Image (tube, rainbow, N blue to C red):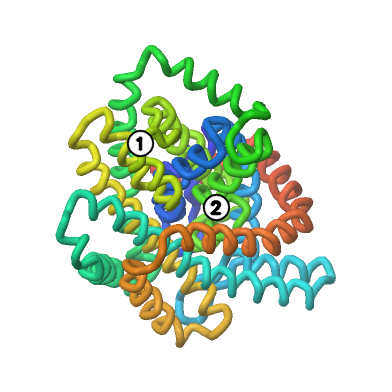
């Protein structure tokens, strides 16, 4: 379905009956801005340093399987989204857990799980979507700009100001910004990675052999094969967020007629985020050998779980000035993730406390950007992972219960596609 998804993204199936606030492409880039972040740079290095090269194999597998999770949760987010009186749209796990499970006769269970999900989403937005992004990017920038070593809170104030200017405009402004910067930063980072891979061109096949071998090796770091598997899946989920229900919040405002249509668009998220971007980061880290901690400096970085700094060291081992450019890329990655996660957290906050209190969450979110410049990085990695697990438990339960409905939606959509009905509905230029 990826070719068909691409046609949807390009607007080939737009109809006069589409309802929403932003285009399918803007929803995709908004969701990608949340996933293509520090996780692609930091989480990959952490996974390989703790689980060995084999963790990269399980990370790719998690990304591949995660495409179906993302498809299911985004479809349900569209199916059960709610248009609020103030003109905004409420979607995501809160909606399909409460309404979807109620349709199965589990009204109270759905409400409890939806509340739990919303609460964990608020905390996750502040933890993984904010403070982790800030702390990891600050570490790299401090290595390039000495001023931030002495005045780290200044970095927090600058980032909070820029982020505030964007998120105050809601999903429309966030989507417009994401539409511009996400394609640019993804292409920019891939070109950097290709440069490094080009200097190790002859041994790339050996790296893939090592990844596959270590994935099933009992001698792998941190618990053998299962240690590599756990690290790979954990960091992949941290990176692409498949199964967390977060992306559905970004996709629910998309202008589409059929919920399944936006679900198909979301297939590109884990594909781009994990299978392409994370794989390239993994190859850079493995080919340069920094994951083994060959020096006291590298070992200290690994022990502190400073994944972004480890990836920076990998790039710097090939081209001395690459870490400076990577510092800019990391800043953009962190910023893009934060503006999207601020929207995720704000929607969850509104679900719990009401639309009039949304400004309170935005202020709290911006304050924590500054606070993040002084918190312990290693603690934030562990805390964020726990929050993601907490999000996944109610969400995946809901996906399993409602998966039969999604299958029915898909079959009905495919019948219309094969019959030509969808082509007939599309607006012609």
Q: Residue at x 43, y 55 (%)?
A: 34
Does 411 sit left or right of 181 as displayed? right
Please name the residue that numbered disc 2 is placed on. 241
Q: Which residue is mark 1?
A: 295
Q: Residue at x 67, y 33 (%)?
A: 225
Badge 1 marks a residue whose secondary structure is loop
| Residue 276, image quadrant | top left
User: In the rendered image, which quarter contains the N terminus?
Assistant: top right
For residue 217, which quarter of the picture?
Answer: top right
- Residue 361 at x, y percent in the picture: 43, 79
Quadrant of the image occupied by residue 352: bottom right
Q: Earlier in the sequence, mark 2 or mark 1?
A: 2
Residue closer to the observer: 228 or 266: 228
Q: Is residue 256 left or right of residue 183?
A: right
Q: What percent of the width, then of the height, locates residue 371?
A: 35, 73
| In this view, 346 is above or below 385 | below
């Amino acid at each position: 379905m990826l070719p068909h998804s691409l046609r949807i993204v390009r607007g080939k199936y737009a109809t006069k009956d589409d309802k929403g606030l932003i285009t399918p492409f803007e929803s995709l880039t908004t969701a990608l801005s949340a996933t293509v972040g520090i996780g692609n740079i930091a989480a990959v290095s952490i996974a390989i340093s703790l689980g060995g090269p084999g963790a990269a194999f399980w990370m790719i597998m998690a990304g591949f399987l995660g495409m179906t999770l993302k498809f299911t949760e985004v479809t349900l987010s569209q199916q059960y989204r709610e248009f609020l009186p103030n003109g905004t749209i409420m979607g995501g796990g809160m909606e399909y857990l409460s309404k979807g499970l109620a349709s199965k006769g589990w009204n109270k269970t759905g409400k409890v799980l939806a509340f739990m999900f919303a609460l964990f989403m608020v905390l996750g937005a502040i933890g993984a979507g904010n403070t982790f992004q800030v702390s990891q990017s600050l570490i790299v920038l401090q290595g390039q700009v000495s001023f931030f070593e002495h005045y780290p809170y200044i970095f927090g104030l600058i980032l909070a100001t820029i982020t505030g200017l964007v998120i105050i405009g809601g999903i429309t402004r966030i989507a417009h910004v994401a539409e511009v910067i996400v394609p640019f930063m993804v292409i920019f980072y891939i070109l950097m990675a290709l440069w490094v891979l080009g200097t190790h061109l002859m041994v790339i096949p050996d790296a893939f052999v090592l990844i596959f071998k270590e994935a099933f090796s009992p001698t792998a770091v941190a618990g053998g094969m299962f240690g590599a598997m756990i690290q790979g899946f954990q960091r992949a989920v941290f990176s692409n967020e498949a199964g967390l229900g977060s992306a559905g919040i970004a996709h629910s405002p998309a202008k589409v007629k059929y919920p399944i249509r936006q679900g198909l668009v979301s297939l590109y998220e884990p594909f781009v985020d994990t299978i392409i971007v994370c794989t390239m980061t993994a190859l850079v880290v493995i080919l340069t050998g920094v994951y083994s901690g060959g020096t006291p400096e590298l070992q200290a970085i690994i022990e502190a779980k400073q994944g972004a700094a480890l990836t920076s060291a990998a790039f710097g081992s090939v081209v001395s000035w690459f870490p400076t450019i990577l510092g800019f890329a990391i800043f953009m990655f962190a910023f893009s993730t934060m503006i999207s996660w601020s929207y995720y957290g704000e929607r969850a906050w509104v679900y719990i406390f009401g639309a009039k209190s949304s400004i309170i969450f935005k202020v709290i979110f911006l304050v924590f950007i500054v606070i993040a410049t002084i918190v312990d990085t290693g603690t934030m990695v562990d805390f964020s992972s726990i929050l993601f697990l907490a999000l996944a438990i109610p969400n995946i339960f809901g996906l399993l219960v409602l998966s039969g409905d999604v299958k029915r939606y898909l079959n009905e959509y495919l019948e219309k596609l094969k019959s030509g009905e969808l082509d007939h509905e599309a607006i012609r230029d």
